[in-house]
Amino acid sequence: MFCRLIRIMHEEHRSVESHRQNFGDAPLLSGFLFLLVASSAIGQMTSLPSVEQALQTNVQPAEVSQYEMKQFEMTRIPPLPKASTAKEWRMLVGSLRQHILHDIAYHG
């Protein structure tokens, strides 16, 4: 089994060497040139004037953004607790205070 693994590795090494003899380092060089060109293009795309220009264009009206934000927030606000007397409110306030202090503020 071990000898078979060595033989397969040797055959793969020979195929890589024959590929390198036929093509040389052309794939390596072309990959390097691609990275060089891509990095210079990326540097140009993120220049200060291009960012300023992108930030000045309005994607959608401010009213639409405000409406969508309100809709998003309203779905995540829990309803107020149902308490009808002052005693119930005091109990709710105490339990909420304990929850906020122990489970949120001083958690961990």
Image (cartoon, rainbow, N blue to C red):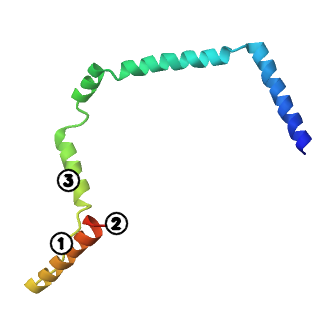
- Quarter the N terminus occupies: top right
Comparing labels 3 and 2, the label whose residue is closer to the camera: 2
Give the CA distance from mark 2 to mark 1: 28 Å
Residue shown at the point (78%, 14%) measured from the top left: 21
Q: Please, what secondary structure does the residue beneath circle 2 have?
A: loop
The residue where tag 3 is placed is 70
Say which label, 2 or 1, has the lower sequence index. Answer: 1
Residue farthest along the left direction in this orientation: 86
Say which label, 3 or 2, has the lower sequence index. Answer: 3
Of the numbered discs in the image, which one, if any, rests on residue 80?
A: 1
Give the CA distance from mark 3 to mark 2: 33 Å
Of the numbered discs in the image, which one, if any, rests on residue 108?
A: 2
Q: Nearer the viewer, residue 31 or 3?
A: 3
Classify 10 Å Cα crowding around label 1: few (below 14), some (14-19), many (20 and above).
Answer: few
Image position of 17 (left or right of 65): right
Q: Which amino acid does label 1 sit on?
A: Leu
